[in-house]
Image (cartoon, coloured by chain):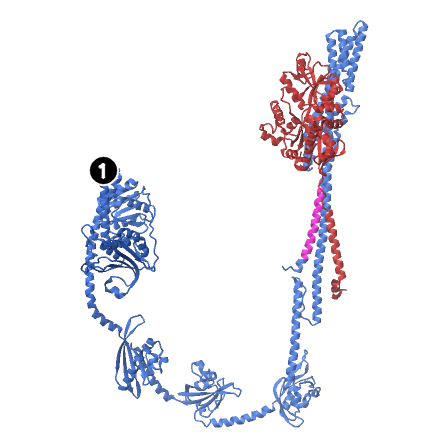
Amino acid sequence: MRVSVSNKIILIFSSLTILVILLGLVVKFNIASFQENADQIETLKNFQIQIKALEAFTLFETDSTEAKLKQLILAELDRTDQITGEFNTSTARLPEKTRTALSQVRTVHLGYYRTALLDFYDRLQAEEEIFQENTRLFSALHNQASSITPPLKGASAFRLLAVLEHGWVVVHQERSGSHLAAMRKAQDELKEIFRENDFTGMTGQIILNSEKCLLNYLALKDRQNFLQATGDRFQEVAGEAIASLAAANKKQQKTLSRQIISIIIISLLLTLVLWLLASRYLHRFLLNQRNAFSAIQAGEYDFQLAKPPNDELGDLMHFFRHVSHNLGETLNQLVESEKKHRQLVENVSDLVWETDSRMNFTYASPAAKTLLGINPGYLIGEPLTRFFPEDRDPSNSELARKFLARESFDGQQSFFTGKDGTKIVLETSCRPKFDRSEIFRGYHGISRDITKRKQAEVLLEESRAFLQSIIDGVSDPIMVIDPEYRIIMMNAAAGKFSSRATSLTGLPCHQISHNSPSPCEENGIQCPMKEVRATGRPVTVCHEHLSGDGQPVVHEIRAYPLVNSDGTFAGIIESLRDISDRIGMERELLQARNFLSNIINSMPSTLLGVDTEGRVTHWNTEAEKKTGVACKEAIGKPFDQIYPFLGEHRNELISSLESRQTRKTTRFIPGTDGETQCTEVIIYPLATNGTEGAVIRIDDVTDLVRLQQKISRSEEEKELLQNQLIQAQKLESLGRLAGGVAHDFNNLLTGILGYAELAMMQLDDAHPARENMKFIHEAGQKAEDLTRQLLAFSRKQVISKCPLNLDIIVENLTKMLGRMIGKKIDIKLKLNPQTRTIMGDASQIEQVLMNLAVNARDAMPDGGRLLIETSEAFIDADQADRGMELQAGPYVVLTVSDTGTGIPPEIQDKIFEPFFTTKEMGKGTGLGLATVFGIVKQHNGHIWVHSEPGEGTTFRIYLPVVEVAAESQAQQLLTQDTAGTETILLVDDDSLTLKLIENSLAPLGYTILTAKSGPEALKLAANPDLKIDLLLTDIIMPGMDGKTLTERLMATRPALKVLFISGYTDNIINSLGISTGRNIFFMPKPVSPSILAQKIRRILNGVAPPPTPH
Amino acid sequence: MPPDSRDYVTFFRDSKNQALQQQIVFILLSLALLILAGCDTGAKPVPVLRIGHAPHDHHSPLYIAAMNPDYFKENGGIYLRETSFREYYQLISHDRILAEVEIFRSNAGGKEIIRRLTEDQFDFSFGGVPPILHFIDQGAPIRILAPSNAEGAGLVVANALPVSTWSDFVILARSRSAPLRIGYKIDMSVQNLIFEQALREEGLSFSRDIEDSTAMIIMVNLHGPENMIPALEDRLIEGFIVNQPFPALAEYQGTGKQIASLYDLPPYGRWHGSPCCAVAGASSFVNSHPEASEAMITLLLRANRFITDNPDQAAQQIATWLDLPVEVEKRALQTIKFTTDFDASWNKGVLFWLENFHQSGGLTGKLKAITLPDELEPLLYDQDLYHRARNNL
């Protein structure tokens, strides 16, 4: 965390300020507390003084008379009242505990004290009364004794009265009962003397009063003790309270001292810590500074900092270090630079020199020795002009002028004559030096020996003139162009490009050829410059130029690379030739070739031209398509290499070329799709304009050939299909007949079975008619089975298909088959473990197996072997077309073979007809194989039979494969709870069925509304208050069918659930366009009341009912 | 003049200065620690336990506990170390001072001594069970901590009175024309309650008016037991009822004769084992000083046992404490049943006192509506403290 220096200073001063404030608050609080305690102690002392004034023992001073005591008591009572009154206000400021204790003093002790005072007062009063009474009695007794005669008797009386009086005085004054016995004795003697009741009564009263006085004294003494104890208690409580407050004060003083000391210590510690931190902080800063200076002084610019703080001073340290680092780097760079430049100056072959303001040399590089033959040291202090005498050459005069003018100049030529008289040409560049005040301080410059260069330039100029004369002799225009497109040399022929009289040298080539300010490439015109530069080889291009008279001319330009001696590219040399006429002819030829090429390429045939060597010369688009080889790649290559298919035709080609005859061949070859292709190859020899070769044409004529074959084959198949059609029509008509009969039968059987079931439910077990009804029911069930077989044959039964594995069905059924066909027949299974899934009704497949097994059993009366196999077969389109009535595709094949008597060939085409049987009368219905046939067809399959008399029979059933996993055959259990209270609208034109269903459902608690037609049902349902939970309706009814009725009702009752019943199969639903779904269900007739009830219950419960058993 | 930067560096890098800095820091820190240590509070102060008693035999366990430090130190480790005889002691448990004990004498006894307990003049106090019940009923924050004794009181009459048994007394009272004067020490004492109940049982009328000639018995308040014997000598009264040692002392002095133990009075058998005195304590002290409370109660219970187990030695020591002849104490102790248990007789007796208060309208506070022993027990006793102490025996 970064804390700035200002914040740190604020923190330090804030901490100290807080401590000072804290200290002040503590002192202030404690002073206030002390003041409060002092007030409380003052209050208590006042209270103590007041209580002390109450001290009860002052009442019992020895010299106090009773009257004085009473007066004191009354004063005490006043004081207690006064103190009690002051308690409430004076104790408010005291601590709770003290206040409670004092409150108890007020409420309890002062109360007791007051009561005791009053009691004391009463007893003093009583004592006074006793005293008065006894005084009065003694006076009366004395009076009576004075009147007693004789005097002796009176004297005795007085003596005895004196005893009594003395006893009384002892009781009253000494508070002692020691004379009570003497008093009683004196009383007894007085009784003897006076025998007067009054006298005796008075003496008795005196003694009683004495006893009362004594007891009163005991009570007074008790009160006195109590008052003393209470007074002591007052002092004690007040003393405790004062002591408590004093202790609290002392404790608080101690606490205050501790707090002040603690705060002082904390302040000291904090100051110390802050001082240490600040000291350490500054120490670190100064140390870093010192280290930095020392390091810089020692040339160590990358010195390390000792933990710089994270604040401004830290930043300063970092900045300082950064500056130092940069300074170091700069110095290093400077040194390096100086070193490098010195090396450069001293190693350079040119003379580097420097003068002062008087133009005397102050520095001359070692090159002075090699250039001028003068030691550099000799030059120092020598005037510059000495080496460039003006009289030697005008250029020296110019140099001298520039020096005088203090000018800066480059490449000024001058001459210097060496000691040996050699003339040296120097090229000098120099700059004047000025200080900050713009005062001239001399020159520094560099002088180069260019003597040899000057000599080479002369030679070069001569060579150039010679070369120009040569190229001017060439008739074709020649131009030398540098990389910047400037013409650097040209011959006289090239001058014709321009009508200008001046030389074209130095002008851009594009300006001359195309009158364009930019290079040709930028205008979309091919320029050889780039290609030549890239390849380093000569390049030929054609350009349309403008001639000197402005007419376009096509030039063939041959461009050669021009390279320097070091191999660098220096430009191109262009040689131009006018080819305008040749270009015109080539264009016409190209158009003709394109026309022919388009014709060849647009032909559907594969066309290729070959030369006499068999190399491809033409290759049309179709050939590219057929072979996948582009024309460019094919041209020039042997045709059989490019198109191996034609390898067999090389001899024909040779033959054709030799004989100049056309050759035609037809070939059958397998195609990529497995089909056989028919190809026709025709070779046309060519011999035109000296071009030898041939044209090969290849055509696919497969379709043409197939068409021809098909025309010839259709006649044979026509007969076979016609036979199959007749057979199918026959079976179809039989099926339709059987289906129609079965429908009517089902209607009848619904009534028969239903009523038989109802009747049995109503009859007791012992009823004689029950047995008959049972026979009727069983016969009805047999008739139902028969009907079901008819429906199966006619393919009108409702089947519930699901993915099945035939192996599982066969394995599960084997045991039952074993029991059914007996032990004499050995059942063998040969199952294919890879058998795939079919879509079928498991019970129907089982029916097929059972029927075939029963037939096999009947064909093997003496035993034999029954083999059941599963396998897979693929029916191709050809097989499918040949009368198997199947779609091409994979099939699971179920094969049932026996070793029985076989089927005679003459009846093999009738075995699937219903009611056709070879069995004895009553042993077979003739529906077994018909049922099998119907089931197989309903599964979109095919049954095939092969039988040889005496060898056995094989039935092979093809069932289509589906690509889904097989399901288990577990069926949902039907619920047994069939009762309900819902309302069912029942519609059927058949009164028997209507009545039966009503009678079977009504006892279960349902409300059944019946209607014999659709309109009647609609009329019933028109009542909107009528709640209908289920519509149970026949489908085929006169007037309005079940579907229409359902649609009309669901228009107003969309949530209505519907159960269709019909003697027809569910095909009728499909044919009417009814789709079963969430709320629409189907059940075939005949209807069993119990199963119907279960199904209805499940529908109403919202549970999808299982497929209805048939 | 600003010092050269090198001076700073030299100063800070000077090892001597660094050592000086360290020394300053060390001294200041040590000083701070010393001052802070000095500010620490001292050890927890030893509490002062103030115990009230009346100078008679029923409160003897306190005297025995105070006079046998060596015995109790060896037997249980809890004892009282004497600072000032009959006044100041230290309660020590296993060589550790648990409390400074101050013993207060209250001559009046009876209701007065318990009143002083409720007024925070004592922390513990011996006293009669009926007064303790009275103040608990009135809401005083006190409870019975331990039993002290049962019985130990008698009816003494003048030697001249021609009676020697309770039956003789009853016959005399009925036959006399003048009422018999019987003194008692203070209002609301166990002795008063028993005697007045017995008079009711016998059908003897009584009054507290000395001039009432119609009553058979005149009950005379003599405001303290010390007034009994002089009053009998002066024939101010003809008999008195009081706890020991005064009956024994009257007989020893020949002033009177004890004709019956109060606990043999009718209804007969009702008073046997009936509680007389107990140790009561202020709840505030018990709650704030549980350890000292437990030790003191343990010691008093052990003292109870000591009296029973060592009657002669106990009589000698009690006589010394009360400044009485040892013969008096020997005689007196025979009539007192010191106990350490709140047994069935004790509980029955307590219920009797409460019933008696009920009938006389004496209960007006928190005990008035409570009759079930289970509800009474936590109000009357500090059973937790008692059981802890009892288990220490």
- Count of marks placed on residues: 1
Quarter of the picture containing the N terminus of chain A is bottom right
**Amino acid type at image mark 1:** Pro
Residue A1070 at x, y percent in the picture: 27, 54
The range drawn in magenta is A9-34
Q: Nearer the viewer, residue B211 or A905?
A: A905
Identify the chain drawn in blue: A
Question: Does residue A796 lie above or below A753 as drawn?
Answer: below
Residue marked by disc 1: A768
Residue B343: quarter of image: top right
Q: Can residue A321 be seen in this view?
A: yes
Q: In this view, does A553 lie to the left or right of A391?
A: left
The image shows residue A40, relative to residue A165, as above or below, that is below
Residue A1019 is drawn in which quadrant?
top left
Q: Crowding near pointer 1: few (<14 within 10 Å), some, many (20+)?
A: few
A59, above or below A831, in the image: above
